[in-house]
Image (cartoon, helix red, strand yellow):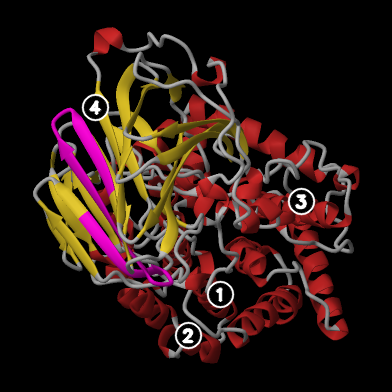
């Protein structure tokens, strides 16, 4: 057991106890040549890798003249999902200017990755022609950088973050090719490419966020490669240094301030690139201050890992989290070895495994403690028992990737997700700003069809005890306090929303829930009506109404999630309307079910959802789907859910 910033993490190595630690990476070229010579598997890999690189080299891929745009604009306009670059890298086939520029940015990333691979191949095989091709690519990018700098243009990419992302590749290619190049040529790569980009990145530092970490990491790598001690001091000790950024951005329990596990992993990758570059240049000892935050950020997600190897999707994240993240552990295993990273490296031949073979390392395990837990750094409350796992969002972090999701929750039963948030699309998509960041895309309370008015409000109170968690926001909407409590009891999960408003104040209290499970009728399910119009509040435009019901008591249906079925009961302190909607979601792109409940009230009120698990023998046997129910009479034209205010986010 190891303790990191107050976080206990289980770590055990196969064959004995181990300690999670940072270590310097190694690079063994003679050993690599011996492995290729003696091992048929490695010989076959090298042959395939050589063919891949030579095929790429045979065509001009990046002319170094076209404008590279923003990768997030290269997306499916209908769903917002990222598009893959065409295999032949024909960016001219993209329909619009932004799409084409985004494709060129992806192509440039690929070409830089290939020039780095070619530099490695040149060193391994001592091939002058391959070294010359890679060197010519660096020359081209140095000319582009110098030309755009004189013109005041954007440089290699429109976005500085893309420049920071490729800096480890470019600087390492310079390191590898330097002994095979003239002194003046290598100096030109530093003076016209690496250092101008690094200084520009550092000059733009203003705030603490994941981009700032990548900027300082890129500048540190360039400074180490080009022996710029003044620039290196900025990244080691300055106000925007890596240690300063990590200290300001990491909570005592190890969570990154943007409260996205995806961006937390992204920060870990930036730190890894710095430590890797330092290892290969004899500067590893200079970066001792990065070790503790690196381990803390890497380990803290284990506390909120759910059964089945995943966890909550919070704020911007282009995919659902994996906990532990096996891809991340593979990428960083040269500086933070783990059993999972070593296992992935042993299964997959690549340059990292060839040059720095994996050894014995500790195994990271999710901490699955039952009970209620306050995860302070994630501003969330975790509830877990032998059947259920739920997380309640009680606050928000930095504004950069924030969603309107306070008092939202996600719920899993065993290995089955019941209510889950969607990953976010490419940031160039209008769906990202108009839907996926907004309250209607989350499992949130609603007041007059609105989520929380102040996206960064602090909870008035939180509670995590025994089998329940709760959070209260005093001013969820003007004059309305909202409390959400999640409770588990063996086969039953209960979500209770309590709304408190002044006497006589008229509001519509309610909530929205998102699920990939199928709704089905029970004998207690009333006939449907509608579908009724949607609220005009922000975010609802992406939803499509399907059916509606009116209830004066308890509304009951069956929710079937794969092989698991639940009785779903919805109740309120007064008559309420419930609507079934079709909602967009990603991971993969699809439509799924959303349930929208609304109840007119004067003064206080409550809404409660309850799920009860059905025996396995009854799962998968619905009597009929909700969409097949015959609509009854339409609801009154004055649908309660149509009452809304139109305030925007307070960001």
Q: What residue does disc 3 label? A: 107
Please determine whether, in this image, residue 279 is positioned above or below residue 638: below
Marker count (numbered): 4
Q: Can residue 493 be found in the magenta stretch?
A: yes
Please report whichever mark, 1 or 2, sits nearer to the chain's N-terminal start: 1
Please report whichever mark, 3 or 1, sits nearer to the chain's N-terminal start: 3
Residue 404, given in percent of the width and then of the height, sits at 48, 61
Q: Are marks 1 and 2 in contact (CB under 8 Å)?
A: yes
Report, in whole angstroms, how far the alpha carbon at label 1 lies from the one at label 2. Answer: 9 Å
The part of the chain drawn in magenta is 470-496
Report, in whole angstroms, how far the alpha carbon at label 4 lies from the one at label 1. Answer: 50 Å
Numbered label attached to residue 612 = 4
Please report whichever mark, 4 or 1, sits nearer to the chain's N-terminal start: 1
Report, in whole angstroms, how far the alpha carbon at label 4 lies from the one at label 3. Answer: 51 Å
| Number of residues whose C-alpha sits closer than 10 Å to that of mark 2, classed few (under 14), some (14–19) or many (20 or more) | many
Residue at x-position 51% and y-position 24% = 528
Query: In the image, is 357 to the left or to the right of 141?
Result: left
Give residue 543's quadrant in the image. top right
Q: Are marks 3 and 1 in contact (CB under 8 Å)?
A: no
Q: What residue does disc 1 label? A: 215
Residue 446 visible, this angle: no
Please report whichever mark, 3 or 2, sits nearer to the chain's N-terminal start: 3
Residue at x-position 42% and y-position 45% = 321
Query: In the image, is 197 to the left or to the right of 600?
Result: right
SS for tag 1?
helix
SS for tag 2?
loop
Residue 609, given in percent of the width and then of the height, sits at 31, 38
Front residue (pair 368, 132): 368
Please report whichever mark, 4 or 3, sits nearer to the chain's N-terminal start: 3
Front residue (pair 59, 256): 256
Q: Can residue 528 be found in the magenta stretch?
A: no
Residue 241, given in percent of the width and then of the height, sits at 45, 83
């Amino acid at each position: 057991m190891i303790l990191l910033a107050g976080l206990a993490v289980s770590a055990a190595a196969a064959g004995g106890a181990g300690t999670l630690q940072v270590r310097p990476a190694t690079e063994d070229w003679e050993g690599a040549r011996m492995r290729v010579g003696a091992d048929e598997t490695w010989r076959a890999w090298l042959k395939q890798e050589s063919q891949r690189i030579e095929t790429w080299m045979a065509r001009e891929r990046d002319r170094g003249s076209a404008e590279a745009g923003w990768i997030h604009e290269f997306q499916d306009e209908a769903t917002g999902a990222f598009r893959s670059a065409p295999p032949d890298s024909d960016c001219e086939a993209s329909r619009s200017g932004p799409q084409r520029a985004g494709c060129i940015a992806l192509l440039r990333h690929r070409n830089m990755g290939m020039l780095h691979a070619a530099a490695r191949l040149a060193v391994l095989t001592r091939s002058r022609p391959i070294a010359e091709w890679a060197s010519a690519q660096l020359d081209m990018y140095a000319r582009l950088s110098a030309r755009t700098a004189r013109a005041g243009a954007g440089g290699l990419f429109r976005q500085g973050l893309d420049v920071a992302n490729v800096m480890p590749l470019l600087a390492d290619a310079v390191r590898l090719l330097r002994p095979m190049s003239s002194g003046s040529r290598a100096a030109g790569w530093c003076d016209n490419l690496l250092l101008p980009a690094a200084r520009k990145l550092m000059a733009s530092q203003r705030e603490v966020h994941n981009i700032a970490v990548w900027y300082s990491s890129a500048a540190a790598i360039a400074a180490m490669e080009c022996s710029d001690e003044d620039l290196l001091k900025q990244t080691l000790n300055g106000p925007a240094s890596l240690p300063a950024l990590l200290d300001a951005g990491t909570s005592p329990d190890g969570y990154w301030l943007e409260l996205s596990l995806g961006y937390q992993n992204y920060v870990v990758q930036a730190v890894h690139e710095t430590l890797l570059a330092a290892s290969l240049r004899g500067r590893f000892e200079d970066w001792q201050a990065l070790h503790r935050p690196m381990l803390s950020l890497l380990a803290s997600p284990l506390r909120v890992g759910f059964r089945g190897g995943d966890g909550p999707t919070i704020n911007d994240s282009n995919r659902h989290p994996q906990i532990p993240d096996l891809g991340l552990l593979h990428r960083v295993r040269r500086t933070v070895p783990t059993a999972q990273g070593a296992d992935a490296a042993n299964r997959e031949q690549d340059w990292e495994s060839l040059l720095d073979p994996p050894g014995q390392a500790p195994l990271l395990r999710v901490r699955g403690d039952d009970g209620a837990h306050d995860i302070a750094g994630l501003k969330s409350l975790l509830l877990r028992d032998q059947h259920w796992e739920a997380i309640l969002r009680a606050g928000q972090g930095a504004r950069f990737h924030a969603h309107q999701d306070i008092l939202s929750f996600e719920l899993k039963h065993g290995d089955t997700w019941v209510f889950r948030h969607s990953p976010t699309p490419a940031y160039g998509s209008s769906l990202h700003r108009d839907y996926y960041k907004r309250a209607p895309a989350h499992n949130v309370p609603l007041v007059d069809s609105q989520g929380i008015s102040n996206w960064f409000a602090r909870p008035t109170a939180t509670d995590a005890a025994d089998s329940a968690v709760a959070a209260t926001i005093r001013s969820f909407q003007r004059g309305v306090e909202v409390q959400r409590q999640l409770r588990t009891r063996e086969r039953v999960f209960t979500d209770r929303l309590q709304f408190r408003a002044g006497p006589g104040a008229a509001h519509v209290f309610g909530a929205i829930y998102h699920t990939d499970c199928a709704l089905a009728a029970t004998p207690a399910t009333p006939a449907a009506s509608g579908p009724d119009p949607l609220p005009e509040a922000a975010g609802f435009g992406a939803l499509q109404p399907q059916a509606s019901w009116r209830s004066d008591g308890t509304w009951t249906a069956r929710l079937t999630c794969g092989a698991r079925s639940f009785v779903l009961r919805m109740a309120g302190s007064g008559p309420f309307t419930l609507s079934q909607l079709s909602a967009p979601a990603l991971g993969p792109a699809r439509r799924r079910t959303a349930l929208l409940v609304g109840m007119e009230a004067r003064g206080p009120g409550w809404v409660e959802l309850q799920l009860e698990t059905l025996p396995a023998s009854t799962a998968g046997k619905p009597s009929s789907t909700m969409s097949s129910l015959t609509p009854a009479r339409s609801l009154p034209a004055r649908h309660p859910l149509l009452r809304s205010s139109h305030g925007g986010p307070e960001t």
